[in-house]
C-alpha cells in the first residue's frame, strides 16, 4: 500500500460525488452534510419542514464547498421517495451516495401504541429507507458503484425499554441493510448501516421533554454508558462518511456500532 500524503487525501475525497441525505436539516444528517460538502460532494438535503431546511442550507453555505440543495419531502410516502430520487437525477444527473437518516422516536408501552403511532414510526424509519433504495438502486446500478448508509440504532441490534415500535423499525432496517448488501454486492454497490447509541440531537431533546424527571433520566442514561457520556452527532457523521468513502471499500452488509460501548 502506498502511504503517500495523497493516500490520506484521496480516501475521504468526495469531489464529483452526489449524495442524498434524508432528514438532513438537523442532528446527525446535518453534520453528515457538513463533512460531505467539505469533502467536495454535491448534496441534496431532504426534510419535511421547508423553513428548517432553508435555514440548514443557509448555515451550510457559510462553509467552503459545493452548493447544497434542499427538497421538501416526507419519506414515509413512497411517491415522495420517488420524487427525492428523480429530483436528484434532474439536479445532478447521477447518485453515488444515499444516506437514509430520517427517523422518529417515541417511548411508549405497547398498550398505548396506536396503529397511527406504529405506522408513523415504521413508515418513517423503515418504509422510507426501503423506498428511497427501491428508486435509487437503478441509478446506482447504472454507475456500477455506490454506497448506501442506513441510520439504524443500538435499538436495531438489541431490545430497549418502551421502544417496541422503534426497535421493530430499526431491527427491520438493520436486516434490510444486510439483505440489500447481498443483492447489490456484484454491482459494486455497498450497503451498510450505523447503529448509534444515545446522541445529543433534537430527537433526544424531544424525548427528554416526555420524561417525568428529565434531569434524573439524563443522568441515569449517561451513567449507563461504558464511556461515561452520550455521543455527539458529528461522531456518528464521521462513521457514516467513512462508510461512504473509499476507505471502506471492502465493507458491506455491516451494522457499525457508534455507541460508546453500550451494546458491548
Ligand atoms: P433529528 O430529529 O435531529 O433528525 C431526524 C430528522 O428526520 C429530522 O430532521 C426530522 O425532521 C426528519 N424526519 C422525521 N420524519 C421525517 C419524514 N417523514 N420525512 C423526512 N424527514 C423526516 O435526530 P437525529 O438524532 O439526528 O436522528 C437521525 C437518525 O438517527 C434517526 O434515524 C434516528 O432514529 C437515528 N438515531 C438517533 C439516536 C439519538 O439518540 N439521537 C440514536 C440512534 C439512532
Image (cartoon, grey):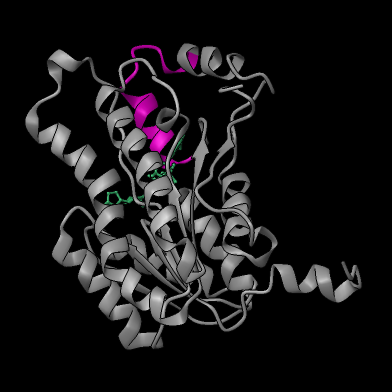
In the picture, measured across the screen, residue 91 lies left or right of residue 237, that is left
Along the viewing direction, whichever of 65 and 160 lies nearer the viewer = 160
Along the viewing direction, whichever of 51 and 186 lies nearer the viewer = 186
Q: Is residue 106 magenta?
A: no
* Residue 200, visible in the rendered structure: no
Query: Quadrant for ligand 1?
Result: top left
The residue stretch that appears in magenta: 201-215
Q: Is residue 183 above or below residue 71?
A: above
Where residue 245 appears, x then y in whole percent? Answer: 62, 65
Residue for point 40% across, 81% down: 142
Where residue 45 appears, x then y in whole percent? Answer: 39, 67
Where residue 149 appears, x then y in whole percent? Answer: 47, 55
Residue for point 90% across, 67% down: 3
- Magenta stretch mostly in which secondary structure? helix
Place residue 223 in its image quadrant: top right
Q: Is residue 210 above or below residue 249?
A: above
Amino acid at each position: 500500500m502506498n502511504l503517500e500524503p495523497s493516500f490520506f487525501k484521496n480516501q475521504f475525497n468526495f469531489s464529483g460525488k452526489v449524495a442524498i441525505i434524508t432528514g438532513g436539516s438537523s442532528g446527525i444528517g446535518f453534520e453528515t452534510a457538513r463533512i460531505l460538502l467539505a469533502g467536495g460532494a454535491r448534496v441534496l438535503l431532504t426534510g419535511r419542514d421547508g423553513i428548517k431546511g432553508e435555514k440548514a442550507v443557509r448555515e451550510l453555505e457559510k462553509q467552503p464547498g459545493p452548493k447544497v440543495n434542499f427538497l421538501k419531502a416526507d419519506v414515509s410516502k413512497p411517491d415522495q421517495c420517488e420524487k427525492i430520487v428523480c429530483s436528484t437525477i434532474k439536479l445532478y444527473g447521477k447518485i453515488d451516495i444515499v444516506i437514509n437518516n430520517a427517523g422518529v422516536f417515541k417511548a411508549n408501552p405497547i398498550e398505548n401504541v396506536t396503529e397511527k403511532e406504529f405506522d408513523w414510526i415504521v413508515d418513517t424509519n423503515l418504509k422510507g429507507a426501503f423506498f428511497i433504495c427501491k428508486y435509487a438502486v437503478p441509478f446506482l446500478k447504472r454507475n456500477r458503484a455506490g454506497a448506501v448508509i442506513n441510520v439504524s440504532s443500538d435499538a436495531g441490534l438489541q431490545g430497549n425499554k418502551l421502544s417496541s415500535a422503534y426497535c421493530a423499525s430499526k431491527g427491520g432496517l438493520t436486516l434490510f441493510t444486510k439483505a440489500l448488501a447481498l443483492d447489490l454486492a456484484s454491482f459494486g454497490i455497498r450497503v451498510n448501516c450505523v447503529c448509534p447509541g444515545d446522541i445529543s440531537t433534537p430527537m433526544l431533546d424531544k424525548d427528554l421533554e416526555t420524561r417525568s424527571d428529565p434531569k434524573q433520566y439524563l443522568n441515569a442514561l449517561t451513567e449507563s454508558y461504558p464511556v461515561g457520556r452520550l455521543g455527539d452527532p458529528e461522531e456518528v457523521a464521521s462513521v457514516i462518511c467513512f462508510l461512504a468513502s473509499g476507505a471502506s471499500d471492502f465493507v458491506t452488509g455491516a451494522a457499525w456500532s457508534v455507541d460508546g460501548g453500550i451494546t458491548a
